[in-house]
Amino acid sequence: MTGYFYLLEYKVTLERLFSSTDLTMSSRLGLTFAIMLDIKKIRADFPILNRKVNGQPLIYFDNAATSQKPTQVIDKIVAYYTLYNANIHRGVHALSQEATDHFEGAREKVRAFFNIPLAKQVIFTSGNTHSINAVASGAHVFVKKEDEVIVSAVEHHSNIVPWQMLCERVGAVLKVIPVLDDGRLDMHAYHNLLNSKTAFVVVNHISNALGVTNPVKEIIDAAHQYDAMTLIDGAQSCGHMKLDMQALDADFYTMSGHKMCGPTGIGILYGKEEALNSLPPYQGGGEMIDQVSFEKTTYAGLPHKFEAGTPNIAGGIALGAAIDYLNEIGMENIAAYEHGLLVYGTAQIKNIPGAKIYGDVTDKAAVISFNVASLHPYDIGTIVDKLGVAVRTGHHCAQPVMERFKIPGTIRASFAFYNTKEEIDVMVQALQRAVTMLS
Ligand SMILES: *Cc1c(COP(=O)(O)O)cnc(C)c1O
């Protein structure tokens, strides 16, 4: 009880101290407490937020496509090329040592951030799509002829096509977990799909098209009951919630640097040590070998087996800086603040006559996918862009989701921790103007 009163008092004090922009109310364990982010200071870290678009201050609500980058990350890229640009792992000279230390230091930051047991289980790739392909292209060691691969109906194309290619190659069958009207996966159907032929289950943690968080722990545990391998596409979760690879227990988990405040061209593939050891390399070349001769080549150990050629050195180092930045704010704080934006934004959008939200459930990320009456999302997107508001329109690389809901696409507003309720108000005004113009 003392804790309860302490929290209430804390909440009231903070409410008095800060304006509503700085505060997000979050309900945990039935208690209300306040999450405070220094939004002014955070926004100052993102130089792009100062620019204008079409003469209007930029309001960036396309964070599910890519996040913006703080100065700390941009400076790290410049520092690498200005001060210690060299190829890594092979040089004895000082610059190469320095670059290697920074790059491997970043790998260690990734390891700690996601609670991964060993740094060698962190494979640097060029992005989330590359990470998925690296697994799918070698997955014939896990998936045999007539086996079954289960995907979900809410996947990004990059978590569908590589598995279709695998199934074609080995003669396996692709099965799909259907999605319910509210955007949640039909878990009853999932459990019925599982059987002794199930060899691999792949789903996203958070759908980029709807924002719905999938019950991945339940999905992974059920797959393991049938000795199936699992891969979780974490492109939408990695920058928005605290993740713990050991608690989750997926065999593979993929992430995108550019969706967690890092640069483009860098991604992460995490795997259990045994799974990564079983998986054959995706590409051959330098860095990934142990011994090369024309009779037989042996591969290097982890992580180098999967990192053929010169990696994105600057990108890896800058991703390390992005992780430092996110850690400083705290992933729990980020998640709670963004949830506040989601709740506020959802209520405001629902006030627009004719608005319909797809995936309107409580367990979701700060992504709102919607349409207004029968107006085309593209027309609305074009008008709000003229007013400085960047939202995504279209099928969001998830055409099966749009087919499921029988729509050509949606308008998608996706928030990050540097966005504010005031920006949501401006977006809603812009949407209302667009609807008036088009109706
Ligand atoms: C963005 C995204 C991808 C693709 O990631 P890239 O890093 O751009 O290759 C895959 N899946 C989901 C759910 C995404 O949001």
Image: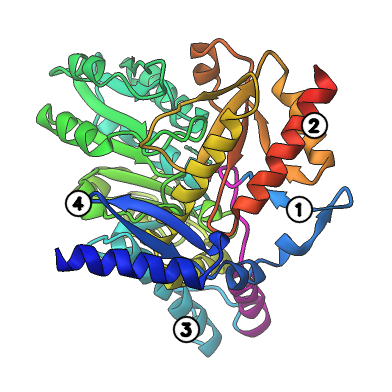
| Residue named by callout 2 | 433
Q: Quadrant of the N terminus?
A: bottom left
What residue type is disc 4 on? Ala
**Image location (x, y in percent) of residue 140:** 30, 30
Whichever of labels 1 and 3 marks the residue nearer the N terminus, that label is 1
Q: Which residues are magenta?
A: 63-83
Observer able to see residue 262: no
224 magenta-colored = no
What residue type is disc 3 on? Gln
Asked whether the residues under the numbered discs 1 and 4 touch, taking CB atoms below 8 Å apart as contact, a structural biologist would say no
**Image location (x, y in percent) of residue 180:** 37, 16
In this view of the protein, which residue sits in the foreground, 264 or 101? 264
Under circle 1, the secondary element is loop
| Residue named by callout 4 | 247
Observer able to see residue 116: yes
Answer few, some or many: residues within 10 Å of disc 3's Cα (few below 14, many 20 plus, some between 14 and 19).
Answer: some
Separation of marks 2 and 3 at Cα, in angstroms: 57 Å
Figure quadrant of residue 62: top right
Where is 432 relative to 103, above or below?
A: above
| Residue named by callout 1 | 58
Whichever of labels 2 and 3 marks the residue nearer the N terminus, that label is 3
Whichever of labels 3 and 4 marks the residue nearer the N terminus, that label is 3
What residue type is disc 1 on? Leu
What residue type is disc 2 on? Arg
Answer few, some or many: residues within 10 Å of disc 4's Cα (few below 14, many 20 plus, some between 14 and 19).
Answer: few
Whichever of labels 1 and 4 marks the residue nearer the N terminus, that label is 1
On residue 97, the disc is 3
Under circle 3, the secondary element is helix
